[in-house]
Amino acid sequence: MENFVKKKILVVDDEPDVLKYLETLFIDNGYYVIRAGNGIECLNKAISDTPDLITLDISMPSESGVRAFRDLQANPKTQNIPVIIITGISGEFNKFISTRKQVHPPIEYFEKPIDREKLLKSIENILKNVS
């Protein structure tokens, strides 16, 4: 039997209901989940827990998702972790991020409310390429 290691997803959102929803969705689909409620926690957990993928909300207190994304990009330990943006802010973030120089742009964008099936399929495809 093949030695199976669960892929680790760091879920970052300031809304407890969204955190719980995504955590349950990912666990039910075979992933290991780490949670963060703001951008500062996001960077700290990304460094300490080395997730395979990060889902990141944009509008958060303490440190915005935009700032957290910049911090992730600036840190050699986290700059190669794929990031999926999950946000209620639509085209504004896409416009903002497209004007910035970055090591790796967010790999995907999802607007709230989230299409569960599209999100899971996207994560599956992204994680196929993560060793």
Image (tube, helix red, strand yellow):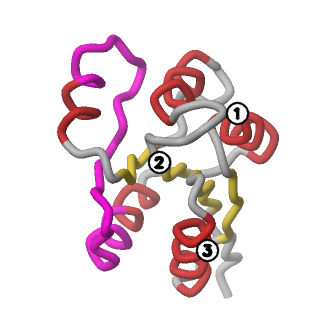
Q: Secondary structure at mark 3?
A: helix
Name the disc covering residue 57, or none: 2
Which span of residues is magenta-colored?
96-122
Q: Earlier in the sequence, mark 2 or mark 3?
A: 3
Between the residue at mark 2 and the residue at mark 1, the CA separation in whole angstroms equals 13 Å
Q: Earlier in the sequence, mark 2 or mark 1?
A: 1
Q: For the point 54% across and 75% down, which residue is it? A: 26
Q: For the point 77% across and 47% down, which residue is it? A: 49
Q: Secondary structure at mark 2?
A: loop
Are circles 2 and 3 on residues that touch, CB within 8 Å? Answer: no
Between the residue at mark 2 and the residue at mark 3, the CA separation in whole angstroms equals 14 Å
Q: Earlier in the sequence, mark 1 or mark 3?
A: 3
Q: Which residue is mark 3?
A: 20
Q: For the point 57% across and 72% down, which residue is it? A: 17
Q: Nearer the viewer, residue 56 or 127?
A: 56
Q: Which residue is mark 1?
A: 40
Mark 2, other Cα within 10 Å: few <14 / some 14–19 / many ≥20:
many
Labels in figure, total = 3
Kind of residue at disc 1: Ile
Are circles 2 and 1 on residues that touch, CB within 8 Å? Answer: no
